[in-house]
Amino acid sequence: MSYRPQYAYPSPQSSIVEEDFLALFDSTIIPILGQNIAGNQAVNDIPLQFQRDAAYSIRRLKLNVTASEDIGIAFKNAFDNPISEPDVYIAATSYEANPSAALPGSTVVVFEPELPMPAGATMFLSFKNLTGSTATLSISVVFFGIKRYPSGLKMQACAR
C-alpha cells in the first residue's frame, strides 16, 4: 500500500544506510496471542522483541484481530510510554485505517511522524476482552518501517 506522508523524511547522512523492514508477531511466535480469554480479563505487557542489528523507525502498523468477542488493544513503545491514551484499551476495530474495509486488518495505520526505536528494542502489547463472555482470540501485528545502519556494514540474513 502506498501513501503520501505528511512529514517529509529527509535522506539519511552518507554514513547511514536505510533499509525497509517488517516485523511480524503472531501466535506462532508468541503463543499467548492465540488463546481463549475470559470476560473482562486483561493480558498486559506482552513483549514484542525487535532484532538487535540496527536502529528502527516504525512508519506503519497492520493489526489483525480475529476474536469471537470485542477485544481492546494497547501498545507501549520501547521507552515504556503508551502510544495511545494511558491505561485505555482501544477497540481493535479502531486500528483499521478504513472502517469500511472488507476484512479487519486489511489496511495499515500510519505513524506520522515515524516512531524511532533503538536496536533490540522491545515494544509491549496489551489486550483485554471488553465483554463478559469468554473470547477465542487470534492476534497478529506487523510493523513496517526502516532500519538504519552504518554504511559499509554487511547485514547478515536473519534466521526465521
Image (cartoon, rainbow, N blue to C red):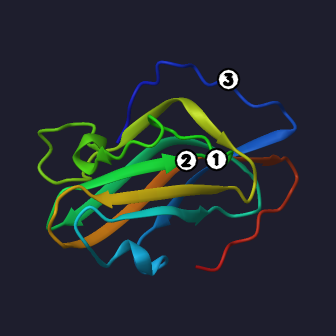
Residue 116 image position (x, y, % from top left): 66, 39
Q: Is residue 128 above or below residue 88?
A: below
* Residue carrying label 1: 80
* Left or right of 139 in this view: 142: right
Q: Residues within 10 Å of mark 3 (few under 14, many from 20)?
A: few
Q: Which callout, 1 or 3, points to the residue nearer the camera?
A: 1
Please give the name of the residue rendered at 33% of the width and 59% of the height, measured from the top-left corner: 128
Secondary structure, mark 2, is strand
Pointer 1 or 3: first along the chain? 3
Residue 140 image position (x, y, % from top left): 37, 64
Q: Residues within 10 Å of mark 2 (few under 14, many from 20)?
A: some
In depth, the one of 47 and 3 nearer the eye is 47
The quadrant of the rendering that contains the C terminus is bottom right
Pointer 2 or 3: first along the chain? 3
Task: Give the residue type that dot 2 points to.
Answer: Lys
Task: Give the residue type that dot 1 points to.
Answer: Asp
Secondary structure, mark 1, is loop
Mark 3 and mark 1 in contact (Cβ < 8 Å)? no
Tag shown at residue 10: 3
Mark 3 and mark 2 in contact (Cβ < 8 Å)? no
Mark 2 and mark 1 in contact (Cβ < 8 Å)? yes
Please give the name of the residue rendered at 27% of the width and 50% of the height, measured from the top-left corner: 92
Residue 129 image position (x, y, % from top left): 26, 61
Q: Is residue 49 above or below residue 99?
A: below
Task: Give the residue type that dot 3 points to.
Answer: Pro
* Residue carrying label 2: 76
Label 1, label 2: how far apart the Cα atoms are: 5 Å
Residue 38 image position (x, y, % from top left): 25, 72
Q: Residues within 10 Å of mark 1 (few under 14, many from 20)?
A: few
Q: Is residue 54 above or below residue 138?
A: above
Label 2, label 3: how far apart the Cα atoms are: 26 Å
Q: Quadrant of residue 110?
A: top left
